[in-house]
Amino acid sequence: MIERIRNAFENYQQEMLDDLAALVAIDSSGAGPVKEGMPFGEGPAKALDCFLKIAERMGLETDNVDNYAGVVSYGDGEETVGVLAHLDVVPAGKGWTTDPFKMVIKDGKMYGRGVIDDKGSAVAALYGLRIIRDLGIPLKRGLRLVVGTNEELGSACMEYYVAHREPPTLGFTPDASYPLIHGEKGSFWAKLFFDKEDLPILKMEAGEVFNAVPAECTVLLDGSVDIDALKASADKGFSEGYPVTIEKTADGNISMLVKGKAAHGSMPYLGVNAIVSAAMILCDALGEKAGKLLHFAKDVIGRDPNGKTAGVYFKDDNGELTLNLGLLRFENGEGWLGTDIRFPVTGTGAYATGLYQAMADKYGIRAEIPTPSEPHFVPEDSELVTTLLKVYREVTGEQDAKSVTIGGGTYARHVGKKFVAFGPEFNDTDYHMHNADEFYPLDEYMKHCVICTMGMLELAK
C-alpha cells in the first residue's frame, strides 16, 4: 500500500505543486482589515476560497464554515478521522532572497511563505484524501480535512469550527514535527507596561507577533545623544555579530537599526533577539537614561530563553518553560513589551500566570495576562499514538522513533483529547519557519505526503 500511495503522489506531483504555488501566492497573514464576511481579513478568506475550489475540482465534498474554516469530506461512519491544517501564515518579514509569495524550487527545495507552515501540509492532506478515494479502500471511519485561517494569531478559527460543526472523533494536525507530538505545553501571550519616563529615546519598535524572535529593532534618539559613544557601544559585540546601523537624520536626530535572527517563539534559543541586542547597546551607552523598560529587557529577560533570571522558570520530565520577548513598542516616553510563555505539560495556567504576575509585581510593572491555553496531552499507549507511530516507522524505516512533547501549540489542543501533531518537519532541521526564506526540501515533502496519507488511511480502516 505504501508503494501504491507513493506512486500516486509521484503521478500527481506537478499538479500538486501548481496548487501549492497558487496558495503561496496569496498573502494570508491576516494583516489586512477585517471585512464583512471575512473574520480575519481578505487574505485568509481568499486562501480558503482557493483551497476549497481545488477540492471541488477533484470532486470532493466541501463546506465553508463562514470563512473561519473549511471542511473537505470523504466517507461516512459513526466516527470520523480528522486532519487539521491551516492556510494562514505569519507576515513575510524582511530578509528574503526570493519573493515570499512566489513559490520557487531551487537546489531541490521549495521556497515561499507557507510551504512548510502550513499550506504545504494542507495540500498534501487534500491529495491524500483524493488518492484514498480513488483507491476505493473500504473505510470504517469517515475522513475530514479541516483547514483553518487564524492559527498563527490564536486559532479562533478552530474554536468557531468546533462551536458550529461536529468535530472529528480523533486525528492529527501536520503542523509540527515527526516522529509524533503527543503533548503540547501550555501557553499565554502577555504584555508588560512601563511608566512614562523622560528619556532621550524618541521611539522604538520591534517585532510583528508574540510568537517569533524579532530580527530587527528600530530606534530613534534625539540629537543630545553622543553618537560616537553610541557607535562605540554598538562595536562591543552585543548584537552577536549581526549588523547595527547608526546614522544622523536630516532633522538632527539619530536613527539606529539593530539586526538579529528570527526564530519561532517556542524555540527562542534558535534566534538572536534584536530587542535584547538594542537594549544592551543603549544601556551601555546611556546608562540610567536608557530607562526602566530597556534595563528590564537587558537584565531580567536578556539572553535567557527559559525565564530563569525573571523567576518564572519551572520544568518537568517532558520539558521546561520558555520565554520569548517578541514585541516592543515605545513612544513619547512610555511603552510595553510583549512576551510568549510556553510552560510544561504537567503545569497549570494558574501556576504559570501566578509566577508571571509575581515577576511583574517584583519590578513594579503592570502586566496584562490573558487566560492561558492549558497543556494538551495524549497517552503514549493510545490507539492514536501507537497507530501513527507504526505508520511513521514503516514508511521511514526508523524503528526506534518515539513520540515527544513540544513547546509549540497546534490545533490538536482545540478539538479534543484524541488529537496529536504529526509532521511535517524531519530531523530537527531549521526550515526557516517564521523566518525569511522559509523552505521545504521537495524529497522530504513527498515523503511527508506518503506518511500523512498512510496515517489517515490506517486510522480510518
Image (cartoon, rainbow, N blue to C red):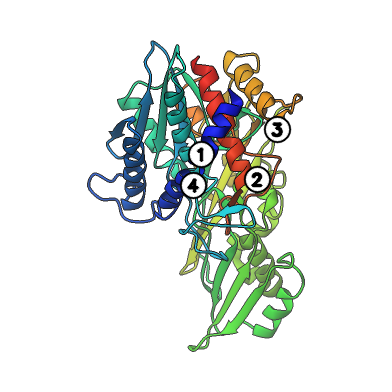
Q: Within 10 angstroms of label 3, few (less than 14), some, or many (20 or more) residues? A: some
* Secondary structure state at the residue bearing disc 4: helix
Residue 204 is at least partly visible in this image: yes
State which tag comes first along the sequence, 3 or 1: 1
Q: Which residue is mark 4?
A: 14
Residue drawn at (46%, 23%) of the image:
135
Image height of 253 relative to 91, above or below? below
Q: Nearer the viewer, residue 248 or 265?
A: 265
Q: Within 10 angstroms of label 4, few (less than 14), some, or many (20 or more) residues? A: few
Q: Which residue is mark 3?
A: 319
Nearer mark to the viewer, of 3 and 4: 4
State which tag comes first along the sequence, 2 or 1: 1
User: Amino acid under label 2?
Assistant: Met
Q: Position of residue 455 (x, y in %)?
A: 56, 24
Q: Within 10 angstroms of label 2, few (less than 14), some, or many (20 or more) residues? A: many
User: Amino acid under label 1?
Assistant: Asn
Instruction: Give the spatial CA distance, label 2 vs label 4.
Output: 34 Å
Q: Quadrant of the N terminus?
A: top right
State which tag comes first along the sequence, 2 or 3: 2
User: Amino acid under label 4?
Assistant: Gln
User: Amino acid under label 3?
Assistant: Gly
Image height of 50 relative to 349, above or below? below
Residue 370 is at least partly visible in this image: no
* Secondary structure state at the residue bearing disc 3: strand
Nearer mark to the viewer, of 2 and 4: 4
